[in-house]
Image: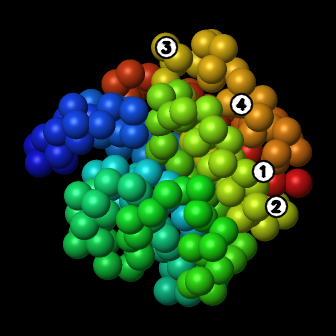
Amino acid sequence: MNAHLLMLGRFVRSPRTVGAVAPSSRALAAAMVRGLDLAGPTTVVELGPGTGVVTRAISARLGPDAHALAIDIEPAFVAAIARRFPRIEAVCASAADLPSLLQARGMFPADHIISGLPFASLPGEVTTSILDAVAASLRPGGTFTTFQYLSGYPTPLAKSFRRALTERMGSPPERRMVWRNIPPAFVLTWRHR
């Protein structure tokens, strides 16, 4: 319940950067990390962890040699992630600064980037700078995973986002549907060529 209240409060205060009134479901979180090998020496980044539903799924799979970084611009979310998941370094920063954040920690390049950012509500120039940062931060063969709600999936903005990321990654996304989320969502995973 605390996570729901925190998410709702942050949404009311800043709907363009939070983008949801409730946390993602556990089913969506499981779909976001499905197929990722986090047991070995790997680096995983979560952009926009919010209240930590996906962070919990990441944390549960982290091996002893894995490194994890969570980045959010909401200080309350960063503090909650740092408190609940000590294995994951939580940073209050912009996702557009991802390459320098990784380099400063000796984590560059990343193997996997998972995003809960509300790209549909972010200004175009912010989305562009974040997508450039993602492409610059992933190793060849690394993955970028995000989701789009079923209701927004066919919109021009969502299509433009997928096209822009496909151009940067050099391959189209793999798509999975998650019905057990409110609202239902597509999980999209690109592999960096």
Quickly name the residue at label 4: 162
Quickly name the residue at label 2: 141
Q: Nearer the viewer, residue 73 or 154?
A: 73
Q: Amino acid at mark 3?
A: Ser
Which tag, 4 or 1, sits closer to the chain's start? 4
Q: Nearer the viewer, mark 4 or mark 2?
A: 4
Q: Amino acid at mark 2?
A: Gly
Quickly name the residue at label 3: 151
Task: Mark 2 and mark 1 in contact? Answer it, CB < 8 Å.
Answer: yes
x, y percent for residue 185: 49, 26
Horizontal side of residue 44 vs 166, given as left or right: left
Residue drawn at point x = 23 percent, y = 41 percent? 10
Label 2, secondary structure: give it. Answer: strand
Distance, label 3 to label 1, CA atoms, is 25 Å
x, y percent for residue 44: 57, 67
Distance, label 2 to label 3, CA atoms, is 30 Å
Label 4, secondary structure: give it. Answer: helix
Circle 2 Cα neighbour tier, 10 Å, few/some/many (<14 / 14–19 / ≥20):
few
Distance, label 4 to label 2, CA atoms, is 18 Å
Label 1, secondary structure: give it. Answer: strand
Task: Mark 2 and mark 3 in contact? Answer it, CB < 8 Å.
Answer: no
Q: Nearer the viewer, mark 4 or mark 1?
A: 4
Horizontal side of residue 95 vs 48, given as left or right: right
In the image, is residue 98 above or below residue 146?
below
- Residue 191 tag number: 1
In the image, is residue 133 above or below residue 108?
above
